[in-house]
Image (cartoon, helix red, strand yellow):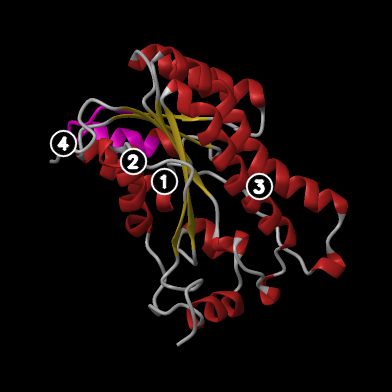
Amino acid sequence: MGTRLEGKRVLITGTAGGQGEAAQRLFAEEGARVVGCDLQDGAAEKTAAELREQGHDVNGFTVDLAEPEQAKKWIDDAAGSLGGIDVLYNNAAGFGFAPFAEMTIDLFRHVLRVELEIVFNTISATWPHMVAGEGGSIVNTASYSALRGIAPLGQVAHAAAKGGVVAMTKSLAAEGAADGIRANAMSPGFVKSPATDAAVPKEGREWQLANHLIQRSGLGEDVAYLALYLASDESTWVTGQNYSIDGGATAGWR
């Protein structure tokens, strides 16, 4: 048990598995009170219950964050039960990939909705709680796809959405500074998770791994430790930044 987030009131999206589940566990072990959510029916409730059995203050709910009303209700209810919000970690995202020649406007709009709009939905509902509480930390998940073009993966929509997350984060940092709100983003490379297993074919995974300087898949825990730092008081002079956590994929070639 640690104390890096002792007493922090934390919201994490996408806690059914992968990076979100890893962060939920790590944050709870570091003393945070956590409320998670996930689109999969009953999945966030399950991972939260497992941690409660270990003595942690964790709850989870089934929420469709693409629906603004559901996102706001989840956040308002969590703020009520926790007595405020200190940290919002936007981990959850949908996906949609296709070569640009095959990309439809419907797919493009879908990806923006489930990768960019859901971040807006949670932050817009959290913002007044953080203002009232004299600040907080927002941690957004972008992608190394926002930083480099990757032709074999067919991800123009994904790159546009995650680029939007990075740009949004910088603007939020500027606007939130006067109220003590920090905002930072993380841009992971290929991280092994149930979501990436479902979304990325074998050839795409192999291509990405070949372009990592550290040639292994990222793990949920790798990203969770960076999120922990950005959520904690260790990073109180850090805002408006985007951190690449990608095994060196954006740094160079082997």
Q: Which residue bears the numbered disc 4?
A: 3
SS at circle 4: loop
The amino acid at mark 4 is: Thr
Q: Residues within 10 Å of mark 4 (few under 14, many from 20)?
A: some
Q: Which residue bears the numbered disc 1?
A: 20
Q: Any mark on residue 164, and which?
A: 3
Left or right: residue 1 versus residue 80 is: left
SS at circle 1: helix
- Report if the CB atoms under discs 2 and 1 are less than 8 Å apart: yes
Q: Any mark on residue 24, and which?
A: 2
Give me the C-alpha separation between circle 2 and circle 4: 15 Å
The amino acid at mark 2 is: Gln
Judging depth in this view, the residue of 163 and 47 nearest the camera is 163
Tell me if residue 203 comes above or below residue 192 in the rendering: below
Tell me if residue 78 comes above or below residue 60 in the rendering: above
Mark 3 or mark 4: name the one nearer the start of the chain. Answer: 4
The amino acid at mark 3 is: Gly
The stretch in magenta equals 46-58
Mark 2 or mark 3: name the one nearer the start of the chain. Answer: 2
The residue located at (62%, 68%) in the rendering is 148
SS at circle 3: helix
Q: Position of residue 31 (x, y in %)?
A: 20, 33
Judging depth in this view, the residue of 241 and 75 nearest the camera is 241
Mark 2 or mark 4: name the one nearer the start of the chain. Answer: 4
